[in-house]
């Protein structure tokens, strides 16, 4: 986007030749501005880079000799070109052509009319040219502004302001993403393109993004309104008013519309109450604030946030429950008797081992209590199995 020519003397050679004495009209000036801005758009920059690399590859395949840098600097120093290393003549020709065209555009811009109105026209021209670059359009819609954040902003500021905020944000980010391409190619061809021009390019991208999002949003609203009227006409209610909130966010349209109508203090209280509940690890309940507001208390589609919902059972937990249930259900009485006999045999073996080692624990109160509890468990094993089944059925909701 680069050169807008706000009165700066950017063509020093014109003053030496007297060519700068010939003024040009506004139309020719804006044409030069448009051409210069297009030259520093991403699509044009990529094309220039492709031409240079293609010329370099063809020269290498043809095994051409590079021209020494001393010779190049001596021949093209008047154009403002400086070569740090030897280069193929085909690549140099592209750089020379780019520089000559750039100087011609600068000369026209410098000799054109000046003034605030002219400067505004130049700015608008540069912005309009950017609309013809598909890369600029795509970069303006990089999704860095979350949908949830956008919906919340719509509730507070309305669709137009929310779209403008999202467009400005995504436009600035998109321009910053593609700007290194433009700046890098400009440095390769040694164009008069510096950091100030890069900042101007990002500014253009920011404005472009805001305008595109607002414009596209308005077109979407018109299309939605047309579909709504057609649907209402078929339903026999042509006089029903369109509610964009309900069309775009049917699950909470009334709340969003009412939030927009509330004062900032109420929205601040809602935010503070929600954060406080989260910090205290409590269910978020903003019903006291909602009830105190004359607008929000009449919202019919408000969902109670204090409602406690049961924690869903994860797949792993469900698999474990099903396994335990299956094992208990498949266990038959003979199997239970065999397990009890095995436990009794192991217990008798432990007692014999204690006797051989002169360890007598029968008189210990704790040992006797444990033995009695174990006997009770053995006698009530069937009851325990039924309890386990009932517990699993309760967890599974049966």
Image (cartoon, rainbow, N blue to C red):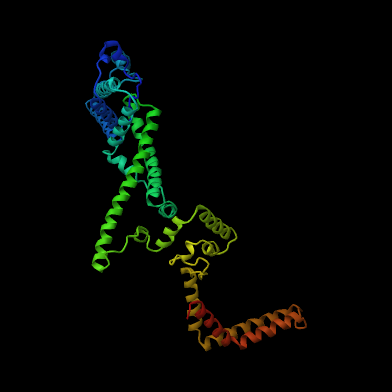
- Furthest residue to the left? 62
Residue 128 drawn at (x, y percent): 28, 36
Q: Is residue 149 above or below residue 319?
A: above
> Percent position (x, y) of residue 313?
49, 70
Which residue occupies 36% across, 43% down? Answer: 210
Residue 41: name its quadrant: top left
Give the image location of residue 262, x and y in percent: 47, 56
Residue 141 location in percent, x, y?
34, 46
The quarter of the picture where the N terminus appears is top left
* Residue 250 visible somewhere in the drawing: yes
Q: Nearer the viewer, residue 82 or 251?
A: 251
Foreground of the two, 110 or 293:
293
Please name the residue shown 61% across and 82% down the image: 343
Q: Is residue 102 above or below residue 216?
A: above
Q: Is residue 127 above or below residue 260?
A: above
Q: How many marks?
A: 0
Q: Is residue 71 visible?
A: no
Image quadrant in which you'd find residue 75: top left
Q: Nearer the viewer, residue 33 or 370?
A: 33
Q: Quadrant of residue 391?
A: bottom right
- Left/right placement of residue 33 relative to residue 180 reads left
> Is 351 situated left or right of 326 in this image?
right
């Amino acid at each position: 986007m680069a050169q807008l020519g706000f009165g700066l003397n950017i063509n020093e050679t014109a003053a030496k030749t007297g060519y700068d004495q010939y003024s040009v009209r506004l139309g020719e000036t804006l044409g030069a501005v448009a051409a210069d801005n297009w030259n520093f758009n991403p699509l044009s920059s990529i094309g220039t880079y492709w031409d240079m690399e293609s010329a370099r590859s063809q020269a290498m395949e043809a095994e051409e000799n590079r021209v020494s840098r001393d010779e190049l600097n001596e021949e093209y120093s008047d154009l403002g070109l400086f070569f740090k290393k030897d280069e193929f003549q085909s690549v140099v020709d592209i750089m020379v052509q780019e520089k000559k065209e750039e100087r011609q555009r600068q000369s026209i811009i410098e000799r054109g009319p000046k003034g605030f109105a002219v400067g505004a026209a130049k700015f608008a021209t540069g912005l309009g040219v950017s609309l013809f670059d598909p890369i600029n359009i795509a970069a303006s819609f990089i999704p860095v502004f979350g949908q949830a954040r956008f919906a919340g902003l719509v509730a507070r500021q309305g669709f137009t302001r929310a779209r403008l905020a999202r467009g400005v944000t995504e436009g600035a980010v998109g321009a910053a993403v593609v700007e290194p391409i433009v700046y890098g190619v400009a440095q390769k061809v040694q164009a008069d393109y510096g950091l100030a021009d890069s900042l101007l390019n990002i500014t253009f991208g920011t404005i472009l993004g805001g305008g595109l999002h607002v414009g596209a949003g308005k077109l979407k609203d018109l299309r939605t309104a047309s579909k709504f009227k057609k649907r209402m006409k078929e339903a026999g209610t042509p006089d029903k008013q369109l509610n964009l909130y309900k069309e775009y966010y049917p699950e909470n349209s009334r709340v969003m519309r009412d939030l927009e109508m509330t004062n900032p203090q109420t929205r601040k209280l809602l935010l503070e109450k929600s954060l406080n509940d989260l910090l205290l690890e409590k269910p978020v309940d903003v019903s006291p604030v909602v009830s105190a507001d004359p607008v929000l208390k009449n919202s019919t589609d408000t969902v109670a946030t204090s409602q406690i919902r049961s924690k869903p059972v994860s797949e792993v937990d469900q698999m474990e429950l099903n396994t335990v249930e299956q094992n208990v259900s498949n266990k038959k009485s003979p199997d239970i008797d065999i397990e009890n006999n095995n436990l009794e045999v192991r217990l008798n073996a432990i007692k014999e081992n204690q006797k051989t080692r002169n360890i007598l624990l029968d008189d210990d109160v704790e040992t006797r209590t444990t033995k009695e509890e174990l006997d009770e468990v053995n006698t009530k094993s069937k009851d325990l199995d039924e309890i386990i089944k009932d517990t699993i059925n309760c967890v599974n909701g049966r």
